[in-house]
């Protein structure tokens, strides 16, 4: 019985390859497919350099005059934990989270059917310009210890960046540093 040839590895542009055939003459599966895919993924992740490229586009606002019950219902429908609060001018006035509804309304015995999203606005929201580099995005979120960051273009809300967006689009080491800085300090 004849043995198949032993694979010979050589390096071409720092990537190992497999040069051999199976018994029936077909090419062997390339054993580096997974590592090539990972390298491509890392390259793709590091090429995404702006807030606009990593954000979740089309953030749905809750209006200042809408109730917290409306906000909670919309969060459930969209499967999100936060909504931007927009004024009548469609400009960002704040952010409301599911936790805000629980702590600032329900836990204090207030009625979510009458309390509005505008009641929970607190100062000027932290935002980032759509053209900002990802290192600036991370720095802003780390400094302010926030997990969601509205993205603004020409004074209008164009999207949101969440922890999940960072995890999908940035290298693991950057995401790890972010989580350590924001979550460990909480």
Image (tube, helix red, strand yellow):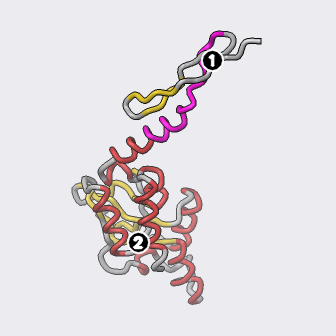
**Which residue carries the number 1 mark?**
5
- Does the magenta-highlighted stretch encompass residue 13? no
- When the figure is inspected, residue 37 is found, relative to residue 103, above or below; the finding is above
Which residue is located at x 43 percent, y 73 percent?
A: 182
* Front label number (2 vs 1): 1
What whole-number distance in Å separates the C-alpha atoms at marks 2 and 1? 56 Å
The residue segment tinted magenta is 25-40
Say which quarter of the image contains residue 90: bottom left
**Contact, mark 2 vs mark 1 (Cβ under 8 Å):** no
- When the figure is inspected, residue 178 is found, relative to residue 167, above or below; the finding is below
Asked which secondary structure carries label 1, the reply is: loop
**Of marks 2 and 1, which one's residue comes earlier in the chain?**
1
Which residue is located at x 54 percent, y 24 percent?
A: 8
Q: Is residue 130 left or right of residue 80?
A: left
Asked which secondary structure carries label 2, the reply is: loop
Other residues around mark 1 within 10 Å, as few (<14) / some (14–19) / many (≥20): few
Q: Is residue 108 left or right of residue 133?
A: right
Say which quarter of the image contains residue 125: bottom left
Q: Is residue 83 left or right of residue 110?
A: left
- When the figure is inspected, residue 158 is found, relative to residue 43, above or below; the finding is below
**Relative image position of residue 158 (x, y in whole percent):** 33, 54
Say which quarter of the image contains residue 84: bottom left
Q: Nearer the viewer, residue 29 or 57?
A: 29
Q: Residue furthest left?
A: 154
Other residues around mark 2 within 10 Å, as few (<14) / some (14–19) / many (≥20): some
**Which residue carries the number 2 mark?**
146
């Amino acid at each position: 019985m004849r043995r198949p040839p032993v694979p010979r590895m050589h390096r071409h542009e720092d990537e190992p390859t497999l040069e051999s055939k199976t018994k029936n003459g077909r090419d062997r599966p390339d054993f580096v497919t997974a590592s090539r895919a990972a390298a491509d993924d890392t390259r793709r992740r590091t090429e995404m350099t702006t807030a606009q490229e990593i954000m979740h586009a089309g953030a749905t606002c809750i209006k200042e005059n809408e109730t917290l019950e409306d906000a909670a219902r919309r969060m459930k429908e969209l499967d999100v934990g936060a909504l931007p609060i927009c004024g009548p001018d469609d400009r960002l006035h704040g952010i409301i989270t599911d936790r805000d509804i629980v702590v600032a309304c329900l836990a204090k015995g207030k009625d979510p059917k009458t309390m509005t999203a505008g009641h929970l606005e607190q100062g000027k929201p932290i935002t980032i310009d759509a053209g900002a580099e990802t290192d600036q995005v991370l720095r802003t979120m780390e400094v302010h210890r926030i997990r969601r960051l509205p993205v603004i273009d020409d004074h209008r809300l164009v999207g949101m960046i969440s922890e999940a967006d960072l995890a999908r689009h940035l290298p693991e080491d950057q995401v790890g540093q972010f989580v350590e800085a924001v979550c460990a300090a909480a």
